[in-house]
Image: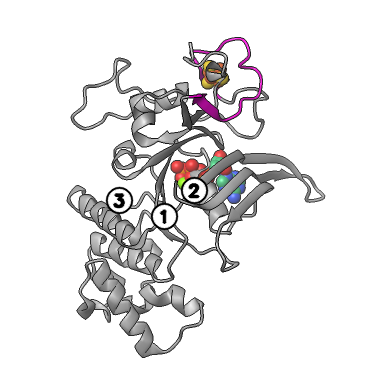
Amino acid sequence: MPEAVLTLDDIHVRFPVKRNWRGQARTWAHALNGVDLTVRRGETLGVVGESGCGKTTLAQVLMGLQQPTQGQLRWNNDRGQPNVQIVFQDPQSSLDPRLPVWKIITEPSYVKGESQESVMRARASRLAQQVGLSPDYLNRYPHEFSGGQRQRIAIARALASDPDVIVLDEPTSALDISVQAQIINLLFTLQREHQLTYILISHNVSVIRHMSNRIAVMYLGQIVELGDTAQVLARQRHPYTRLLLDAVPVLGAPLPESGAQAIPELPGNRVLPTGCFFLDRCAFRKQGCEQQQQLKPVSTETPMHSVRCHRYDHDEPDGK
Ligand SMILES: Nc1ncnc2c1ncn2[C@@H]1O[C@H](COP(=O)(O)OP(=O)(O)OP(=O)(O)O)[C@@H](O)[C@H]1O
Ligand code: SF4
Ligand SMILES: [Mg+2]
C-alpha cells in the first residue's frame, strides 16, 4: 500500500455565528465534526456531499487556512512545511488578471524565494508544455485565454511548487462539456507522470466516479462512508450515500427505483444531534441509532470500506 501523505485525526472546526455584548461566541456553526482520514501518495480521493456538508472547510484545513478547533493533522514529509495547492472551480476568478501568464504560473516558486526572471520564465515554459499550453503565449494575460486554457494555467501553477497534495475543487464544473474531458485526461496524465496526490471535491458523482480511486461521503461535517470507488458505488452502505446517489441521474444509466428525487435540505449545524447525525432523515433507523456512530469497516472481509452506521456494527455484518 502506498505511504500516507497525511493523516487527519478527529478534526473539528466550528465558526462563531452569534456573539453576546462582550464579544463572546454564543452560537456556533459546526462545520467539521470529527473527520478521520488517511490520504495516500498517488491516489485521488473524491470528496462528495451536498452543499454545506463541510467540503470547503476541509480543504481550508488542509491548506492551513483554517485551524482545527480540535484534532490533529499530520503530514508525512521531511520538509517540515506541507505544500498544498488548489485548483478552483472558476479559473477566471482564481487567476490574477493583472499578471502575465508566466508570472501566474511561477507565483508559488516566487513565494518560495526563486526570483531570477530568466529562471522563472524557463520554468513557466516547461510547466506550460506539461499542461498542453504553447510557451509562445506566456506573455499574455488570463482574459486572452478560453476557459479550458485558463484551467490549464491554474493546473500549471499548482504543479509549479511540487506539492504534496493538490486539492481540485470542482475543477471541471465551470467548463464546457467538450473541454471537461480534456482537463480530466490532463489531470490523469500529470498524476501518472508525477505521482500526484489529488483530493477531488465535487457535487458531480460522474466526475468522482471517473477520477477517484476512493470516495469519502460527507454529511454534516463527518465522513459517513469511505472506500474504494468501485466498491462504494456498487454497494452503498450508508443510507445517506444511497440517497445522494439516487438523486444524481447518471448518463446512460436507468433511473433508480426511487426516481431522481431531490435531497431535502441539509439540516442546520448550530445544534448537533447527540446520536447519528442522519437519524431524522433515515428510513432505516432502529434501536441504537440514538447513540453516537463511529466510522468502522463494513465487515471484517472489507476492512477498507468503512461506514458510520449502526446497521453495520460487527455483530450484524450484513447491515440488516
Ligand atoms: N466563516 C464561516 N462562518 C460561519 N459559518 C461558516 C463559515 N464557513 C463555513 N460555515 C458553515 O459551515 C458549514 C460548512 O461549510 P462549507 O463551506 O465547508 O460547505 P461545502 O460543503 O463546501 O458547501 P458547498 O458545496 O456549498 O461549497 C456550512 O453550514 C457553512 O454555513
Ligand atoms: S445509524 Fe441508524 S439512523 Fe443513522 S444512518 Fe444508520 S440506520 Fe440510519
Ligand atoms: Mg464549498
Residue named by callout 2: 39
Q: Nearer the viewer, residue 37 or 48?
A: 37
Asked which quadrant contains residue 161, the reply is bottom left
> What SS does tag 2 mark?
strand
Residue named by callout 3: 172
Q: CA distance from mark 2 to mark 1?
A: 8 Å
Crowd band around label 3 with a 10 angstrom C-alpha radius: few (<14), some (14–19), many (20+): many
- Amino acid type assigned to the residue bearing label 1 in the image: Thr
Report the span colored magenta. 278-300
Please identify, in this view, whether the residue under mark 2 or under mark 3 is nearer the observer: 2
Q: Which of pointers 2 and 1 lies earlier in the amino acid sequence? A: 2
Q: Is residue 100 visible?
A: no
Tell whether label 1 touches label 2 (CB within 8 Å). yes
Where residue 59 appears, x then y in whole percent?
51, 51
Q: Which of pointers 3 and 1 lies earlier in the amino acid sequence? A: 3
Q: CA distance from mark 3 to mark 1?
A: 18 Å
Q: For residue 285: magenta?
A: yes
What's the magenta bit mostly, secondary-structure-wise? loop
Residue named by callout 1: 197
